[in-house]
Amino acid sequence: MKKYFQFDELGTTYRKEFLGGLTTFLSMAYILFVNPTTLSLAAIPDLPAELRMNQGAVFTATAIAAAIGCLLMGIIAKYPVALAPGMGLNAFFAFTVVLTMGIPWQTALAGVLVSGLIFIVLTLTGVREKIINSIPSELKHAVGAGIGLFITFIGFQNAGIIVSNDAVLVGLGDLMNGGTLLAIFGVVVTVIFMVRGVKGGIFFGMLVTAIAGMIVGQISPPAQVVGSIPSLAPTFGAALTHFDQIFTIQMLVVILTFLFVDFFDTAGTLVAVANQAGFVKDNKIPRAGKALFADSAATVVGSILGTSTTTSYIESSAGVAAGARSGFASVVTAGLFLLALFFSPLLGVITAPVTAPALIIVGILMVSSLNKIDWNKFEIAVPAFLTIIAMPLTYSIATGIAVGFIFYPITMIAKGRIKEIHPIMYGMFVIFILYFIFLAA
């Protein structure tokens, strides 16, 4: 085992790897409860039952998809990078694809499956690099920041801090409402944890908020902590049975969005963690293809189980900071996700006010990419800004990406920088124009 994971070459030990894997798990364990709440649209009242995914099944799918992803990354790519259903992508799945576009969640899962399969093909054929290089870095950073604002907006809504307002569309909610006060308390506690550098600050913030909610009577205590594993039956295989419903322009845009966001989320995470761990040599990441394959394969498996796109987590950097250097740390994280399957009764106490702070804090972390955009160049600032602002205002990540990708060639051509536009960007321009024409039809 030590030889396979190259402990001696990496200067690591079982103790360091276990602590690193545990730290990573605690840093991202919030997804076990946030993902089922998000995909089931639990915070949206008065929805038809057929629009909601089963929370128990999504919980099980989340844990298993994360465990499989971590195992693939640890054993095949040998990196201390953990995977789980991604924040942002789950919001796009639930609030844009299902709630706004009216696409059945079963069809949306089929879209996730196709995006994963395409990702595998792109990785194995080497086309991945060409696509990554065709999209300007400013737009990549704008997409990340826009998703951050979108997630934060959803968090404020779920908390009741921001509500609909007939006069000005949105406004401040009733801050004296019990659930809203609990969410505000959760934001404050989580911010303190994060500022103090507490490993797993988001997870522990949710834990403290849930306990506080039970103390003040806002949340009913669970009948038990450990229970049986919820059945996957409500979601398992739905992606396969609805595969024939993906051949529309609308679903093409959905699939491209799943693919695009996962593409750069994974690449960015891999570069960041590899740099932190000292793996980058001559500006290249060893075994990058294997890492990307692990990510895309986990997405395919997760979609069949019943969850949105599974992707690499930047929280893995917390594990690296704690000493993780090999894939064994990811194996440890995988084992902890499997162990977490027995704690499904806690889903009952993870209500919208408890998960809202996690969404808000993750959003804050995601907008850090704003400083990597050259705002002094107006031809860049316009598509970047429109990408960012359109996501929360239209309640759609896909629309934000579409607006930005349409305006980019327009502003670059107007500036006389036509030679800098990659041909693939023109293809994207046409696809997204067709997307808006289809929506208006």
Image: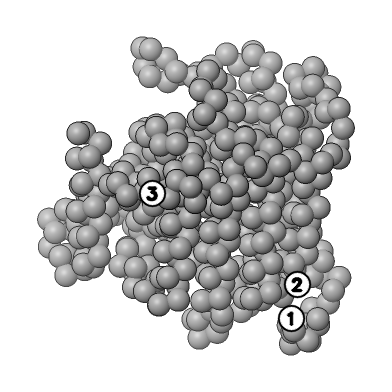
Q: Which residue is mark 3?
A: 244
Which residue corresponds to the image point at 82% horizontal and 64% vertical from the top-left? 19
Question: Residue 110: where, in percent of width, then height?
Answer: 46, 49
Q: State how the image is colored.
A: one colour
Residue appearing at x 74%, y 29% in the figure: 348
Question: What residue is drawn where x is 50% and y is 81%?
Answer: 284
Label 1–label 2 contact, CB within 8 A:
yes
Label 2 or label 3, whichever lies nearer to me, is: 3
Identity of the residue drawn at 77% across and 47% down: 341
Looking at the picture, which amino acid does disc 3 mark? Asp
Q: Earlier in the sequence, mark 1 or mark 2?
A: 1
Q: Is residue 252 left or right of residue 64?
A: left
What amino acid does circle 1 point to?
Phe
Q: Which mark sits nearer the N-terminus, 2 or 3?
A: 3
Instruction: Give whichever of 216, 105 is nearer the camera.
Output: 105
Q: Quadrant of residue 423?
A: bottom left
Q: Residues within 10 Å of mark 1 (few under 14, many from 20)?
A: some
Q: For mark 1, what is the residue?
A: 5
Q: Is residue 174 left or right of residue 57?
A: left
